[in-house]
Amino acid sequence: MTSSRVSDDVLTWLLDSDPALRWQVERDLLRAPDAVWQATRARIATEGLGARLLAVQDEAGTWAGGAFFPAGFDFTGPEAQPGAGQPWTATTWSLNTLREWGLDPEVLRERDTVRLIGVNTRWEYDDLPYWDGEVDACINGFTLANGVWLGADVRGLADWFVAHQMDEGGWNCEWVEGSTRASVRSTLNSLKGLLVYEEATSGTGGAGGSDAVRQAQAWAEAYLLERHLVRRLTTGEPVADWVFRLAYPFRAFYDVLTATDYFRAASLLRDTPPDARLAEAVEAIRAQRQPDGTWLQARRHPGRVWFEVDVDAGQPSKWLTFHAARVLGWWDDSVHGSC
């Protein structure tokens, strides 16, 4: 184990960033006073990436006119072919991005976004109402998180995860097609949504809102932890090469960094120590740190975007460097003491 300290040069580089990233660097790496990072965070709505994404919200309250796919998406066309990638422009992806960047939800509440989406947007699957979710675990995790963030009534979605949890403890977005085995990707995306719900309900009826929901979370977390986030339980071999391939934006993909970052957030919310089974994942993240203290972008996930938010493959990524440094700092401070 080596020091997780971020050098002054790297901090200076990270601070020279869009408000959507800079406020997080100020809060989580610099430990700046609340007034400092809160002022930076407030700029998301009016400057840079956040303002650009808000500018393409349409009069119907949506992005690209669709729920998960752009309106009029051709499910047999070139964009739907293997390797083409998911289009990242529709409403769900845009809400995910703004929430993860830290936009004040009041900005979208003032635009009547919840009501407009509810009136104008239905899922591509069976034309289901947007805020009720659908049959895909990842989509329901996103909808739960976005609904809690914006104040929509999504209480039923938390219970959906209890009813659809698989025997292994996780979830699989392809259960409706007959899959009976959980997947790390679907499980992580489900857990992320449930953690947002837990934080919102922790003062109103207990963590997670109900014992059943908390038990489902604990079972799903154990599913990932007993695999050390990166290994197959059956053989002990790595899940796949892509588990170590770091790329921002994280989108709905699974990798060792975004999975470990989930457990960091859960640990801080619950004021519990890190689980020792995270050690291998943490060291896999540490191993990718470059001599200059940065982390490199492994790839850009293919698919249509409004605009790029990070660097090309092979270049130092500010977003990955921040997330990796934050995870290592949390782990080292909690497990080994401050370095």
Image (spheres, grey):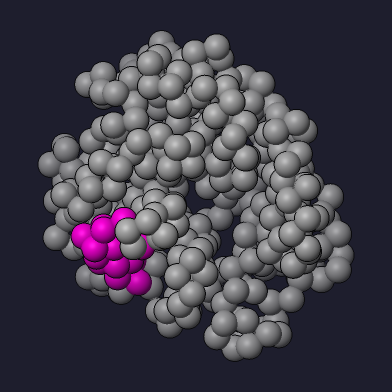
Which quadrant: the N terminus? bottom right
Residue 224 is inside the magenta segment: yes
Which quadrant would the C terminus be assigned to in this image? bottom right
Taking the spot 38% from the left edge, 31% from the top edge, the residue there is: 82
User: Magenta-highlighted stretch: main secondary structure?
Assistant: helix
| Residue 108 visible in the displayed image | yes
Q: In the figure, is residue 120 to the left or right of 23?
A: left
Q: Is 190 above or below relative to 6?
A: above
Vertical side of 137 occupied by 33: above or below: below
Rendered residue at 33%/38% (across/down): 154
Instruction: Say which of 99 and 212 sits in front.
Output: 212
Q: Which stretch appears magenta?
A: 207-225
Q: Position of residue 162 (x, y in %)?
A: 20, 53
Residue 14 percent across, percent down from the top left? 78, 56
Which one is nearer the viewer's eye here, 273 or 182?
A: 273
The part of the image, by quadrant, that contains residue 195 is bottom left
Q: Residue at x 64, y 55 (%)?
A: 320
For this view, does 310 lie left or right of residue 233?
A: right
Please say whether residue 204 is one of the residues in the magenta stretch.
no
Indicate the position of residue 218 as horizontal and vertical percent values: 29, 67
Residue 216 visible to an observer of this rendering: no
Q: Quadrant of residue 295?
A: bottom right
